[in-house]
Amino acid sequence: MMDKRDKKIRRLEDERNQLMAENQELKYIINDIQSVNDIMREDIEKECAAECGCIVIEGSRTSAAYQDLVGILLANNYSVEVIPMDERRKLKIIIKESEV
């Protein structure tokens, strides 16, 4: 009778040890994820803080309006990100602080 009980206790202890090891591993994974999340949050906050505004214009990168606007912005130490819109008939120009 005692032998059966000992086997069950041993099996439960093994299961407990396995669960404790898995729990510890999950804690490490959560810590890693939180670290990555913190870094990404900082990067996103910096990116958003650098944004000054955006303008949508008609035309393409070769249009005079685009060339003039971007030229003025760059001459005044801004950087720009350009996103084609409306099947490339419009451009969204995101104005950012210079990355210098």
Image: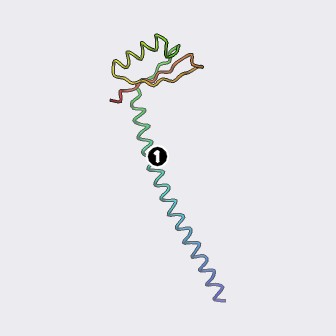
| Residue 22 image offset from top left, x and y in percent | 54, 64
Few, some or many C-alpha atoms within 10 Å of disc 1 (few <14, some 14-19, many ≥20)? few
In front of the other: 17 or 74: 74
Q: Amino acid at mark 1?
A: Asn
In front of the other: 17 or 61: 61
Mark 1 lies on residue: 37
Q: Is residue 88 left or right of residue 67?
A: right
Q: In the rendered view, tell whether residue 60 sits above or below residue 39.
A: above
Quadrant of the rendering where the C terminus is positioned: top left
Residue 77 occupies quadrant: top left
Q: Is residue 90 left or right of residue 36?
A: right
Q: Is residue 16 left or right of residue 39?
A: right
| Residue 73 image offset from top left, x and y in percent | 38, 18
Residue name at image x 50 percent, y 21 percent: 92
Residue name at image x 42 percent, y 44 percent: 39
* Label 1 residue SS: helix
Q: In the rendered view, tell whether residue 71 sits above or below residue 43.
A: above
Task: Farthest residue to the top: give it.
Answer: 64
Residue name at image x 63 percent, y 89 percent: 2
Residue name at image x 50 percent, y 63 percent: 24
| Residue 61 image offset from top left, x and y in percent | 49, 17
Quadrant of the rendering where the N terminus is positioned: bottom right
Residue 46 occupies quadrant: top left
